[in-house]
Image: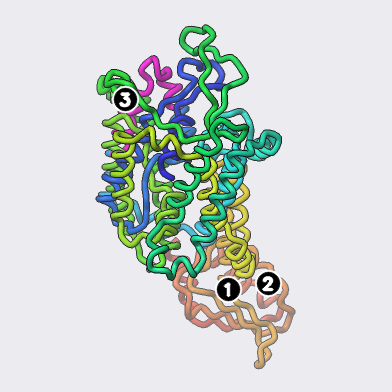
Amino acid sequence: MALPLCLGISATSTSYEGIEGVVDHPVGLIMPGLIAGIIGGIVVGFLSGSRYGVSGPAAGLITIVTAAIIEFGGVQAGGFEKFALAVALGGVIQFIFGLIRAGFVAYYIPFSVIKGMLAGIGITIFLKELPHFFGYDKDPEGDMAFNQVDGHNTIEELGFAFENVHWGATIIAFISLIVLIIWGLNFVKKNKVLSLIPGPLLAIVISVGVSALFMGTDLSLVAEPTEAVIDATTGQLAEPEPVKHLVDVPTPSNFDEFKAMFYFPNFSAISDPAVWRVALVIALVASIESLLCVEATDKMDPNKGRTPMNRELRAQGIGNLFSGLLGGLPITQVIVRSTANIGAGAKTKMSAIIHGIFLLAFILAIPGVLNLIPRATLAAVLLLIGWKLASPKSIIAMVKSGWAQWVPFFTTIGVMLFTDLLKGVFAGLIIAFLIILYRNFKMSFFLNDESADGKVHLKLSQHTTFLNKASIMKRLDTIKEGKEVVIDLSETISIDYDVKEAINDFIEGAEDRDIKIELIHGEKLEQAKMSH
């Protein structure tokens, strides 16, 4: 499953088709995504402390990659070589983040936002894979943004897919889905022989066989194109290639073609401020996305393990350093592959390392065999992953947990669906922070004007800030004349100057309202005054 995602993210990140003023490399590059996937598996997998996390090129960085390559002049003008240098430098910066223990940031992400991110990714995957499920493959795998590189948005793409259903791909997708569902049932899991066979692998083998049976019929996944193609380099009509609803791994015919697929860093650009600026952006965004995914993966960990966050930043940094030096895309931990890893029954981080080794071995040794895999089967696998991440059961549980949980949860999902992962998470964090401020505003003091002793009791909590000034003043103003008021500061540690002034003003005006004041630990008001 990592293979088509690596290919798709690479093509999407480096494809300029439809971007105004940039037409120098319309088909995109292939190897940078594969390099990132291999490095993410082998290098990051080896160094990381995450048991189930799988790293590779991330959809969340597509916009940054594309914008940087355009800023550097495009692929043919040496823009990718400059970008590769920025990736390597970004890795160094990430490693420094790990050394200075910046990973603590992950522990401040609310549970509701993490759950919202998982559900948002699940819904996005589900919507993005439905077109591939029905054989409509215009948008590359891994394009998770609402506005896609094929010129449509996520919702529009569904309409085009349903108008252009490829029945051969659809039949294969449904067969694959049935196999996957059956292989998830208890009788298979408990069978000593059947449980040794991975459901996705079985679905792929069966789908390759069915695809072979469809060859030469109207259901074939390989069809001759109906439109002429113009060569991007010469501008002349070119021999159109067959339309394939299959995985498309590059198969160079000789060493020169293979060598031409690689782009290495341009170290002469190390003094360019723009390169360093892009490197810092990559380091920051890749670190945030990795920490988010690590936290989410830990939440799904059946053993409830905890990943060392600073070690993860160092591992990701070294991974990005190697990826940049070899001409790869930026690397982060990726929730889709991590979820698949857990679902497949992984026990240790060796699964992530071995997946990287398999990627390398298969691409070098049997790329032709990989090109027999129907995209529709991979879409069926991803659909189930999306369903698990955004299961109705988990959504209902969040709704039942109270408004303070489900408001940031649904905010994260909504913004993510119509923008991207990071914007969704930041929106959820802002809402969660506002809710925290609101609850702190409501609960920083307690006023009881119907106590058994007939007195009005005002008790301040441990920390009372200027945010509570308005509500405290409002409640004090409602106290009736002739009452006796007890102001209790026994548990208070800190009082903002504004609140202290409001209470002092109330005390000074109490005599005019015939209100008697009893202060408990009133010296704290004086201490607050002296400290300011």
Of callouts 3 and 2, which one flags the residue occurring earlier in the amino acid sequence?
3
397 with respect to 335 (left or right)? right
Mark 1 nearby-residue class (10 Å; few <14, some 14–19, many ≥20) = some
Mark 3 in CB contact with mark 2 (< 8 angstroms): no
Residue positioned 38% across, 31% down in the render: 278
- Indicate whether 294 appears above or below 162: below
The nearer-to-camera label among 2 and 1 is 1
Of 217 and 438, the residue lying toward us = 217
Of callouts 2 and 1, which one flags the residue occurring earlier in the amino acid sequence?
1
The CA span between labels 2 and 1 is 10 Å
Residue extent of the magenta highlight: 67-91
Residue 71 is one of the magenta-drawn residues: yes
Mark 2 in CB contact with mark 1 (< 8 angstroms): yes
What kind of element bears circle 2? helix
Mark 3 nearby-residue class (10 Å; few <14, some 14–19, many ≥20) = some
What kind of element bears circle 1? strand
x, y percentage for residue 412? 58, 52
The CA span between labels 1 and 3 is 64 Å
x, y percentage for residue 369? 39, 36
- Indicate whether 305 appears above or below 146: below
The residue carrying mark 2 is 475
- Indicate whether 216 appears above or below 425: above
Of callouts 1 and 3, which one flags the residue occurring earlier in the amino acid sequence?
3
> What's the amino acid at mark 1?
Phe
The residue carrying mark 3 is 262
**Residue 445, numbered circle:** 1
Residue positioned 59% across, 32% down in the render: 217
Q: Can residue 516 be seen in this view?
A: no
Residue positioned 58% across, 55% down in the render: 431
- Indicate the quadrant containing the C terminus: top left, top right, bottom left or bottom right: bottom left
